[in-house]
Amino acid sequence: MTWVNAIVQGLLLGGVYALFACGLSLVFGVLRIVNLAHGDLTVLAAFLAVVATGTLGVNPLVSLVVVVPVMALLGFVLQRALLHRSLQGGELAPLLVTFGLSIVLQNALLQTFSADTRSLPAGEFGTASLQLGDGLAVGWLALSTLVVAVAVLAGLQVVLARTPIGRAMRATSDDPETAALMGLDDRRVYAIATAIALATVALAGVFYGMRGTFTPTLGPQLLIFAFEAVIIGGLGSLWGTLLGGLVLGVAQAVGAQIQPSYGVLAGHLVFLVVLAARPSGLLRRKELR
Amino acid sequence: MTDVPTTPAPTTAPRVSRTTAASRVAAVVALPVVLLLAALPYLAAPNVTRLLVDLFTLVLLATMWNLLAGYGGMISVGQQGFIGLGAYAVLVADLFGVNPYLGLVLAMVAAAVLALPTALLVFRLHGGYFAIGTWVVAEVYRLVTVEFRAVGAGSGASVTGLSAVPPVLRGAITYWCALAAVVVAIGGVYLLMRSRLGLALTAIRDEPTAAATLGVRVRSAKRIVFVVAAAGCGLAGALIAVDSLRVQPDSVYSVQWSAFMIFMVVIGGLGTIEGPVLGAVVFFAIQQLLAPYGAWYLVVLGAVAIAAALLARRGLWGLVTLHRDVRLLPTGHRLRQDR
């Protein structure tokens, strides 16, 4: 039963990772930028929620009403001010810029909020669980995180596949010059994509903050988990990202069941095995990049 | 258009030269400077040479990262994996009673050997995903290392083999090792970039597909660079271990090393030999000056690096040499017209 429990908890954990990863996946898919500040932006969202819940005295879930728009706006500004300029600077510039941003965010958060461990108190909702059998219980919060992750990924899929802005994003992703010739403003398309990505980052940050604890220096770890989920699932596939998140979550939970210190390591090893055996990911798209 | 003066006909055939005026001066100045630095333990107080060991380690790291990114076109955020391995190689050598200074060589070998299978995996990724891939491998190194109780698991251990050596002598030997490492690294990269491989690397960095169609063995050239850079970072880690006599996993495997390397190279000037050295000196000065302000110095450095990446892509060295053909260590060829 402990193993079944480990797998179930791993799947739920995978929901959070999938939520982290879809923003990374979207920015890479549309802008062809790997945002190395992705994890730190997630932590920033969690700290924004700390401030919002502290000053307004509301539940973290309610704080999403503030945090999600603020992060989306930040994404829009970030794209306009930094990322778009870096896109013109060749392949290295976006990496250097986002890495610089990661260090700036991390240390600014460290100086502002100290290195103390924080969490977002979710009240009764955070501790209540659904009993599925003896020794097997599923937390309502964990379950709702997974549901939110699936909903966000499905929503993104629908936006990309069926809406005009989604079509614009796909066109710009495939060939920015031709898309621009067809009258698409790539600056606007990129900025909207980054705004949507950071909105999902805000969701991920708040849900992660309610599930566990976080510190200003957690960002890099979250970036690595998001990245592993994207690569395990397969670049460019949103459903692959969900699958990758779930596989990573299960690997970590099962590893931790063997010995607590093996959890993260097991996740890394599964990632390396997938990289060695199936480099284009579990849900392989016909063409890579 | 008619009043444009025509070039006078050349009296002799053009000559291909590999040196510039600045490089000839640099070649003459280099030897006395290195000799003076080598004599420094006899001339200056031990705390001066100790600071210089830190600086030399940074120069070594910056030179290695530049070799990877500036010449190999590979942005790695995982070099701390090799720094950590190098530091632990000294620790393991020490456990077996091997002299820790001999451990410096073992550290290079260990890092180079582990770089081969690492390259096999991470070379499947490109661009930013390569960067994070190297980072994951570095994390795996760290997580595996802390499972070994013999090297102090999560809290690390001390290097004990040098306790019999008097501190002043120990400081001097460490300093000489660091100086030698920097001279070999800069000289080595200079010779490498002037070689056939250097030409291949420049071609790969500019356009890998075109280089491959011209017969450049892209993967093999990149692998050599990756292994050399790993060995250099391993040596830097070993220097950190013999300098501080203490190895802690969270410190030697910290991603902060990658941040330092990136800042030094980007601020100094990517893709030149002189730039990373200048960047390391500037970084070291900022680090020392802003040390009282805690982590704010990293916020400042991050902002400066972003500005450099966006506005001054050739870094400080690029600004210094703007519109001037100043090359202290020229790697290319120049066409000269003797009159």
Image (tube, rainbow, N blue to C red):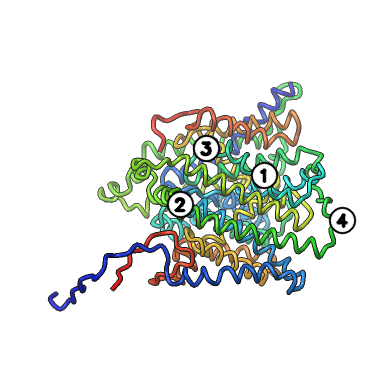
Closer to us: B149 or A183? B149
Task: State the SS at label 3.
Answer: helix
Q: Residue at x 43, y 70 (%)?
A: B326
The residue that label 2 is drawn on is: B195
Q: Give the residue furthest to the right.
A: B164
In the rendering, at what x and y percent does residue B192 appear? 50, 52
Q: Residues within 10 Å of mark 1 (few under 14, many from 20)?
A: many
Chain identity of mark 3: A
Q: Residue at x 23, y 70 (%)?
A: B10
Closer to the eye: label 2 or 1: 2
Closer to us: B116 or A118? B116
Q: CA distance from mark 1 to mark 4?
A: 53 Å
In the rendering, at what x and y percent does residue B299 appear? 60, 63
Q: Residues within 10 Å of mark 4 (few under 14, many from 20)?
A: few
Chain identity of mark 4: B
Closer to the eye: label 3 or 2: 2
